[in-house]
Amino acid sequence: MKNRSELREIAMKILYQVAILKDTKLDYDVDELVKDQLEVENDFVLDLVHGILKHQKEIINIANSYLIDWDLSRLNKVDQAILGIGIYELLYTDTPSIVAINEAIELSKKYSDEAVTKMINGVLDHVYHGESHE
């Protein structure tokens, strides 16, 4: 059985695949992508992926409102997925805020450079505190 950190990483990979498939306008089934990544069905991953995709427009708007002189679409798709997971967990789940932020930062440390990790940390901190940069 995988722990939640490993499951978030799987969700990130699925969200990355979805982004690539959308960009190339290829058909896909989210549930099939999830099944391809997991040995056994997992509600946490399913809820995370489906929830993020359901709230994607709101998540993008929230991220963009905290990215100073930057736009989410300029980040690579892995970083977009990581930030999406963090924002989704902060706003739409009962995951403790500190856990949601720390998990996103740990994923970012593994897959991103230090500058992007700092940016993700800053955005999630602002989301957590409900602050605006304006």
Image (cartoon, helix red, strand yellow):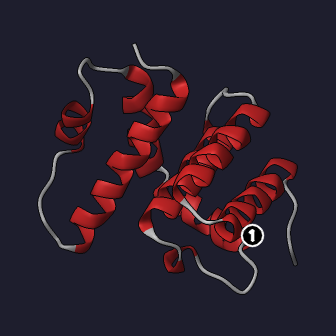
Q: What amino acid is at disc 1?
A: Tyr
Q: Quadrant of residue 60?
A: bottom right
Secondary element type, mark 1: helix
7 shown above or below 60: above
Q: Is residue 106 left or right of residue 77?
A: right
* Residue that numbered label 1 is attached to: 66
Q: Quadrant of residue 102?
A: top right
- How far from the left and from the top, in percent, is residue 51? 46, 41
Residue pictured at 77% horizontal, 54% vertical: 127
Q: Nearer the viewer, residue 104 or 59?
A: 104
| Residue that sits furthest to the left in the current view | 27
Residue pictured at 79% horizontal, 61% vertical: 122
Q: Is residue 32 left or right of residue 111?
A: left
- How far from the left and from the top, in percent, is residue 54? 42, 48
39 shown above or below 34: above
Q: Is residue 116 left or right of residue 11?
A: right
- How far from the left and from the top, in percent, is residue 15? 37, 51
